[in-house]
Amino acid sequence: MTSNDGVEQLIGNTPLVRLGRLFPPPGPEVFLKMEQFNPGGSVKDRTALGMLRHEEQAGRLRPGMTIVESSSGNTAIGLSILSKERGYRVVAVCDRHLPAGKRSRLRALGADVVFLPDTPPGLDTVQLRIAVANHLAGSSDEAIALGQYSHPGNPAIHRATTGPEIWEGRQGDVAAIVAAVGTCGTISGVGQFIKSVDRGVQVVGA
């Protein structure tokens, strides 16, 4: 068993697992990229790491600062795990329907959770969450709103890690990639890398 200097080294290099029972021969070979093996339990650990690295390299993020992020839970969890080692405080702006398990996990990781006020049923609250996060971050010179929906570090880390892992794991035998889309960071980064090595691969957003 190998040892690691920090949790950052545990992010990525997740396994590819074939769905042989759902797609038996002679049908297509379909594989899952098992992102739940990241320490925070989702692909958003990569997003969190990509954004933090980008801001640190640009000199905009220093120990002692506060990170404010609009999140449905997973990105904030990733940021909280990584921020404990780096000396940042995390404020997660979330909807009130955030599952209890994610609430507990965020608080256990030391994050402060700010919930939106009651909103009408069916209202898309993403833009409201982003506006609240920007407002909170703007109230202090020692705070920064990362903004995963538009942050260049989001697709960049998938271009640098997730895409190459898929390509190398399949030794270039890839006909199509399907990714769920939210911020579109995963599909954008993976798609950019895959198209750079084989423009014939189909990239599908679900």
Image: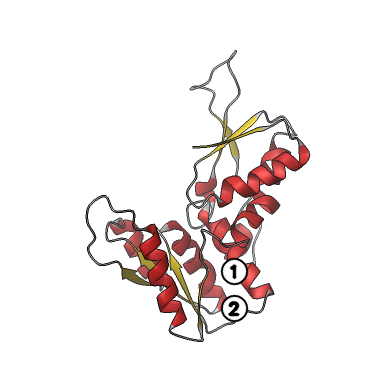
Q: In which quarter of the image is the N terminus?
A: bottom right
Q: How many numbered markers are drawn?
A: 2
Q: In which quarter of the image is residue 28?
A: top right
Q: How crowded is mark 2: few (under 14 residues within 10 Å), some or many (20 or more)?
A: some
Q: What percent of the width, then of the height, locates residue 36?
A: 50, 48
11 or 27: nearer the viewer:
27
Q: What residue type is labelled 1?
A: Leu
Residue where numbered disc 1 is placed: 52
Q: What element carries label 2?
A: loop
* Residue 160 visible at all: yes
Asked if the residue at tag 2 contacts the one at tag 1, i.e. Cβ–Cβ closer than 8 Å, the answer is yes
Which one is earlier in the sequence, the residue at label 1 or at label 2? 1
Q: Is residue 1 visible?
A: no
Question: Residue 48 location, x and y as percent?
Answer: 55, 62
Residue 61 numbered mark, or none: 2
Q: Within 10 Å of the Cα at label 1, are there few (<14), some (14-19), or many (20+) other Cα atoms?
A: many
Left or right placement of residue 15 versus residue 69 in this view: right
